[in-house]
């Protein structure tokens, strides 16, 4: 049985139509548009909005870059199936859960320092 990091690394290579990367790209664009509409008083809005703008400008590139972080999210890990023979992974996560995972990780992806 493969380690979690091996399974999730394989998931970042799922670039087939309707695969993980394509689905992530679509959900990132949706989230970015919502972040751009949030109140200016939202904590860390400037950094969150700057990241959202990068996504709007280059959705494929930013999805590929974010895939390693998102693939290691708990909801994504729980929905990933690994094929030990082919060394490939697929993810059956629902759009709702993928969106929730993005909301959870947004500040991290935007580079917000969460340290205390």
Image (spheres, rainbow, N blue to C red):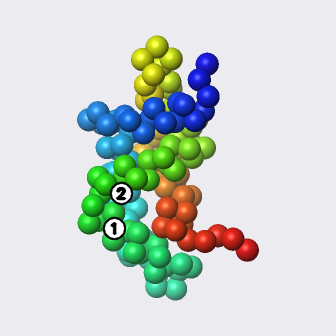
- Labelled pair 2, 1 in contact (Cβ < 8 Å): yes
Q: Is residue 6 left or right of residue 12?
A: right
- Seen at 56% across and 44% down, the residue is 72
The circle drawn on residue 62 is: 2
Could you say where residue 63 lies in the image, as x and y percent from the top left? 37, 52
Q: Is mark 1 on a helix, strand or loop?
A: helix
- Residue appearing at x 48%, y 67% in the figure: 110
Relative to 25, residue 5 above or below? above
Query: Is 74 rendered above or below residue 17?
Result: below
Coordinates of residue 34 in the picture (x, y in percent): 39, 68
Judging by the rendered image, the residue that carries numbered circle 1 is: 54
* Residue at the spot 56% in from the left edge and 79% down from the top edge: 43
Q: Residue most toward the right?
A: 116
Kindly indicate the quadrant of the structure image that contains residue 21.
top left
| Mark 2 / mark 1, whichever is N-terminal | 1
Residue located at (38% from left, 68% from top): 52
């Amino acid at each position: 049985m493969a380690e979690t990091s091996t399974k999730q690394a394989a998931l970042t290579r799922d670039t087939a139509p309707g695969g993980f990367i394509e689905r992530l790209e679509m959900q990132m664009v949706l989230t970015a548009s919502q972040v751009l509409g949030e109140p200016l008083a939202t904590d860390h809005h400037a950094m969150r909005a700057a990241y959202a703008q990068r996504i709007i400008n280059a959705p494929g590139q930013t999805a590929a870059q974010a895939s390693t972080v998102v693939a290691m999210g708990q909801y994504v890990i729980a929905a990933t199936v690994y094929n030990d023979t082919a060394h490939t992974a697929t993810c059956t996560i629902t759009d709702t859960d993928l969106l929730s995972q993005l909301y959870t990780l947004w500040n991290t992806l935007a580079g917000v320092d969460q340290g205390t």
